[in-house]
Amino acid sequence: MAFQLLSDGSTFAYSNVENPKVCYMHGWGRDSQDFINIIELFPGIALDLPGFGKSKSLENSMSPFEYAAYLNDIIPPEINTLVGHSFGGRVAVHLSFLRPINNLVLIGVPLLRNTPKKSFVNKLSIFKNLNKFGLVSSAKVESIKNKTGSFDYRNSEGVMRETLVKAVNDDMEDKLSSIKSNVKLLWGENDMDVPVTIAEKSQKLISNSELTIIPNQGHNMLRSNPNSIFEVLKSL
């Protein structure tokens, strides 16, 4: 499998076929190596998304749509199938509106917003308001975020944290019914990050979609169960 630099001069990818038809996009904090077992079974190109892996760090934060618009200019024109895990799936959906994409394979993708616990929202809101009046320091507000925010949020900072916030706030619900691609939703039965209920609700909104739930698998099943993804790709 060849490691290559794409036309922008800063985004890296692995590819094991000329003129790839399939493009793999990893999740938050991950890289193209998540697809190393899958790409051997179903050849294509696996990206290190900008800001991750060997690709150049981001200078400015990017929304999932901005990722899609950027990638649209640099990935091979022959690509007609996008495979996206989690964050990468968000980008894939946006990209499907920018170029003809026959197939979308979405693995544990937060297509709908998972409402945070009310207690956390209320607590954070109170501390933000107190901060406005100088009654609580900005450091205290940040401490609350770090203690109660997600693992990804706590482990991101600067531009990448801003990018993560844009992704979390990317409401895709209104876009799902407009997807023209053939959509395969693939979910781990025990996914705690993006529960199966999200997949079930999303499927009802996507006209040409099929949901496959993999038993005894969680959110990060790319390496532990590549065959399940291969079977879906074979069925396209």
Image (cartoon, helix red, strand yellow):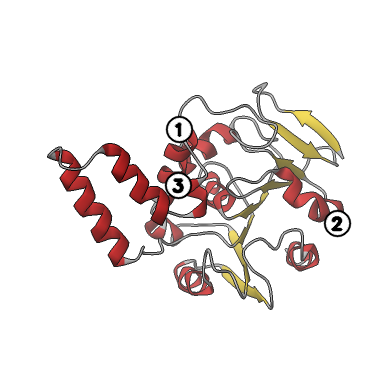
Category of crowding for the residue at label 3, using alpha-carbon neighbours closer than 10 angstroms: few (below 14), some (14–19), many (at least 20):
some
Residue 186 coordinates in the image, percent (x, y): 64, 67
Q: Amino acid at mark 3?
A: Ala
The residue closer to the viewer here, 135 or 68, is 135
Residue behind mark 2: 41
The residue closer to the viewer here, 151 or 112, is 151
Q: Work out whether mark 3 precedes mark 2 in sequence or the reverse, and give the earlier one.
A: 2
Mark nearer the viewer, 3 or 2: 3
- Please report the residue visible at 73 percent of the width from the left and 51 percent of the height from the top: 34
Quadrant in the picture for the C terminus: bottom right
For residue 180, above or below residue 137: below
The residue closer to the viewer here, 20 or 141, is 141
- Say what secondary structure mark 2 lies in: helix
Residue behind mark 1: 158
Real-space Cα separation, disc 3 to disc 2, in angstroms: 30 Å
Task: Please indicate whether residue 60 sits to the left or right of residue 30 in the image.
Answer: left
Quadrant in the picture for the N terminus: top right
